[in-house]
Image: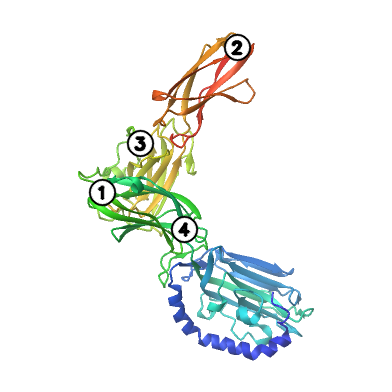
Amino acid sequence: MFSTERTTSAATACLPLRVLASVVGMLALAMACVLATAAIAAAGQFHVYGCRTPSGAVAPTVGWSGSAMGTADSTQDTCAAGGALIAALGDGTTHEVETNYARWTFSAPAEIKLAGATLWRAGDAAGGWSTNATYEFWLAGPEDEDAEADVFDECVAEFGCPTGLGNTGTAMSSSNLVTVPSENLGTDLYMTASCTGSVKFVCPSGKGDPNGYAAVVYLYAADLVLEQTSQPVVSSVEGELATASTLSGTADLSLHAEDGGSGVYEAVFTVDGIETGSVLLDENGGHCRNLGPAGDGLPAFLYPQPCPSSLTADIPFDTTALTDGTHHLVVTVTNAAGNSTVALDRKIDVANDPPAAQPEKESPPSGGSQSGSADGAQPTSATQNDPQSQTNPAPQQGSDNGSGASAGAVLRVRWSTTAHTALRDAGARASTVLGQLLAPSGVPIGGALVSVLFTPSYEGAHTVALTSARTSSLGAFRVRVPAGTPSGRLTFAYSATLGGAVPSVTSALSLSVPATLALRVTPRVASARGTIAFAGTLHGEPLPPGGKTLVLEARVPGESWRQFEVLSTGAGGRYRASYRFRLPGPVVYQFRAVAPAEADFPYAAGSSNVVAVREL
């Protein structure tokens, strides 16, 4: 609320200055707009649309919060239905000065401030005024306390609303347009309807507008320019692209990135000083997709924090798009504001002579798969169930990848049995991934090749090409992940142009498969102080150097498991151990072997079958 200095008498004394300031502000608007273009074009900025986009499309109102004081006072958000953010004082009662108000506030996220703001608003103070009390609405920033310093647009009933009421019939009318002066930009904007004047006086009732409001302000649209100076923080840069001395075929780059402001947006690849492509690292449920450059060339979003604050990404890079020899590769990670951090800067040696094997032009027949290599990269092919992939020839390298190919495509993938990004207990049978490829407008991209890569979840694992899927006329595709595939990360990559080194968009799913192991115990009946032998096999490769750690556990039925021995597997995952009973029976014990999760074994924790032994 305003201070008590905003009394009717004080307002009357200040009226000439206010009116003059308002007129001067309107005359200076054209010059401010010219200067704003240069300011807005600075690095580290992006647009956020609220309630409506400048074209009039519905937009969310994230970042805006409403508050009201008084039984007949309210804030309403009707933007989703094509309405407005409304702050209003009802006309069914009187309102006390400096007590009753309704307010909408925009607050910029951490690390971000407002660098520009254009608002479309209308309203009135039709409830009128009485002695030392008047209805009004105002827009203010960066604070909402001092009238002269903070208020840049207002309508005061007692003074006939000198800045105009706007047009409530046409949301995007030019008469509703308000450009926020630079001195009013900070971290917050305020839009308030209130009764002001001298404390203990009241504004009248029964004189409102047709909607029953004594004072109301409607915000139909907001085009905010947010600014961020901080950069993303990148860590855990790994993968063949980052470490291998010589590269061929498809090499992967994995990294972790964090950004506390606008969020982690893209990875940009530059080879020999030329940008070769960029990839959106995480759509964040669609929030992180750029709506397209605004008139000043800046990106535009619908959310003040559009992109994830933290993510881990695995990005494929096709070295066959480069000539053999040495190249200078730089990979940067940007936030939504456009600030970047170098994630990788190195010389790479490319050797694709003879050329690396190209992806299959058609999908393999149903059920086709083959086992992986000795380094643990198990799957090398999979099946898709799409008749179109059997009949349509693959496009030529360098041509558009699919009908309506787009670098801004939306790539959606999920498991057929669950939408979650982790699938457990999948080792016993093949699992199916369902996907769809859409243009930014939502139109399917048909006949497009989507590459599928797999990275096993153990340290030092290489990313391998799993298969390529062809989208149907509806943009749909499916991929079967073969039985026996270990835990890991599936990366689905689409490039708008065939043969591009960097995909236009990627999506990923995680596969978590428990370790499987068998246990045998002999004999199954033992005498007191007798000895029993354990033997079994842990399935899955590659085994860690020196063997995989296993834990033997025992319990009396109905009680908790207790560890009694730790051992390591030998060749082929085989293990052996023995145990001598120390206490007399009779008693029945249950035994099992447990394989804990380890960073150098591509399976989640798993346990064996349970074996019962009777001690006499």
Q: CA distance from mark 3 to mark 4?
A: 34 Å
Q: Residue furthest left?
A: 354
User: In which image quadrant can residue 133 be found?
Assistant: bottom right
The 10 Å Cα crowd at callout 1, few under 14, some 14 to 19, many 20 or more, is some
Is any part of residue 470 visible from this angle?
A: no
Residues under numbered marks 1 and 2 in contact, where contact means CB atoms less than 8 Å apart: no
Q: CA distance from mark 3 to mark 2?
A: 45 Å
Q: Which residue is mark 3?
A: 379
Q: CA distance from mark 1 to mark 4?
A: 29 Å
Seen from the viewer's position, the closer of residues 195 and 609 is: 609
Depicted 568 relative to depicted 492: above or below: above
SS label for mark 4: loop
Q: Which residue is mark 4?
A: 232
What is the three-letter code of the residue carrying label 2? Answer: Glu
The 10 Å Cα crowd at callout 2, few under 14, some 14 to 19, many 20 or more, is many
Q: Earlier in the sequence, mark 2 or mark 4?
A: 4
Seen from the viewer's position, the closer of residues 492 and 208 is: 492
What is the three-letter code of the residue carrying label 1? Answer: Val
Depicted 596 relative to depicted 130: above or below: above
Q: Position of residue 267 (x, y in %)?
A: 39, 56
User: In which image quadrant can residue 459 be found?
Assistant: top left
